[in-house]
Amino acid sequence: MPFGFGLLSAQRTADDPRSWEDVYRETIELAVELDHLGYDSVWTTEHHFVDDGYMPSLLVTSAAIAAATTSISIGTGVVLAPLHRPVRLAEDAATVQVISNGRLILGLGLGWSRTEYDVLGVDMSVRGKAMTEILQFLPKAWKGEPFTWLGDVYSYPELAIRPAPRDTIPVIVGGEVDAAVLRAAQHADGFFSNASPRRFAQQVQVGLDEMERIGRDPTSFRWIYYSVMYPGPRDEIVESVWRQTWKYSDMEASANRPGIAHTPALDADERASATESIVGGSPAEILDALTSIRDSVGVPIEWMARSFFADISYDRQVEIAGRLAAEVMPFVPTG
């Protein structure tokens, strides 16, 4: 069963001695290591204006990863689609698909930061409608033939977008709410979720019900589930997981901050919550947890270990990826 790794975010930490050049070099080098380790896919993630540099340009980085690797699929988890003009999104994705010889997985989501929408000049109130149009626009754009687009949000005169990718670009929708699942079932190739196991089971049922309603074959649909995975005692990595999750609450406040904020200390409740979110322990314990998730949803699942941590050393990051590849990846449950 496919097993991926991410979410590569190219973040720095407070007092980090590395330059941005160092951080992006390590990002590409880690993707190369993942390719050598046999991972099926590597995933990046998008936000804007964050003090720690949370990756803003996923398709630029994807092209660099494509040029440095040979076989690993390159997923975006996710491009915040309404923040991008559909024509440029189509062009950039097609270019990555050509450079990578067909290895791009284009994950798309809405985003939630009003700061991002305001600064980039996009009307947040129509983001759902914009996403639906983008999902309909992209397949037409990638045919490489002239077409006209007259939508509710976007309009373009007759044009042809090139290069036209030889290989179909799979489009995956990510999100939490039912509306995201419904869009995926109607217009995309799959769904990308990091919900709780219980909520993920609900999302799957929403998607299956919608596919039945519209007459779509559910076997053509991809369910991709990602969670923090750590091959060892969860308390060894809980501080890094806390930093990873806390940063989302700090993003908008950090947009005009001159330096990178230090992560606040965990209190008891925060420590318990962060620990609970980790699929960790021995390989057998990790595999038991994944099997339980698979059994609860009843569909084939593609797995992604969200096991990139911005505050640990590169060597330790490679070690974690290597252990997951050797001790978990070969045994993940199939559908």
Image (cartoon, helix red, strand yellow):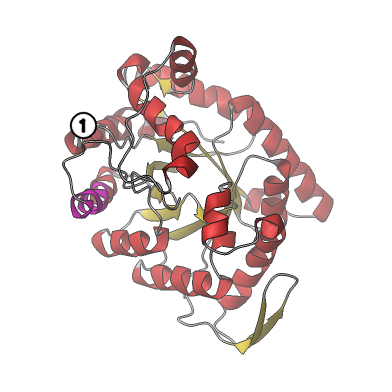
Rendered image quadrant of residue 316: top left
Q: Percent x, y for residue 329?
A: 37, 34
Residue at image position (61%, 71%) is: 139
In front here: 249 or 210? 249
Tell me which amino acid carries mark 1: Arg
Say which residue appears at 59% left-offset and 88% top-offset. Answer: 159
With respect to residue 68, does 27 lie above or below? Answer: above
Q: Which residue is mark 1?
A: 316
Horizontal and vertical percent position of residue 192: 56, 45
Residue at the limit of the structure toward the top, as seen here:
268
Residue 324's place in the image compared with 1, above or below, is above
In the image, residue 229 sits, relative to residue 13, either above or below, namely above
213 relative position to 62: left or right = right
Residue drawn at x 68%, y 38% is: 204
Q: Is residue 148 visible?
A: yes
Question: In the rendered view, would you say 269 is above or below 159?
Answer: above
Q: Magenta span: helix, strand or loop, mainly?
A: helix
> Callout 1: helix, strand or loop?
helix
Task: Give the class, few, some or many, for how many residues have Cα within 10 Å of label 1's Cα (few <14, many ≥20).
Answer: few
The magenta stretch spans residue 229: no
**Residue 143 placement, left or right of 204:** left
Report the front residue among 183 and 248: 248
Residue 332 placement, left or right of 127: left
The image quadrant where one finds the C terminus is top right
Residue 330 lies, in percent from the top left, at 37, 34
- In the rendered image, residue 118, in percent from the top left (x then y), is placed at 57, 57
- Number of on-image labels: 1
The magenta-colored residue range is: 20-30
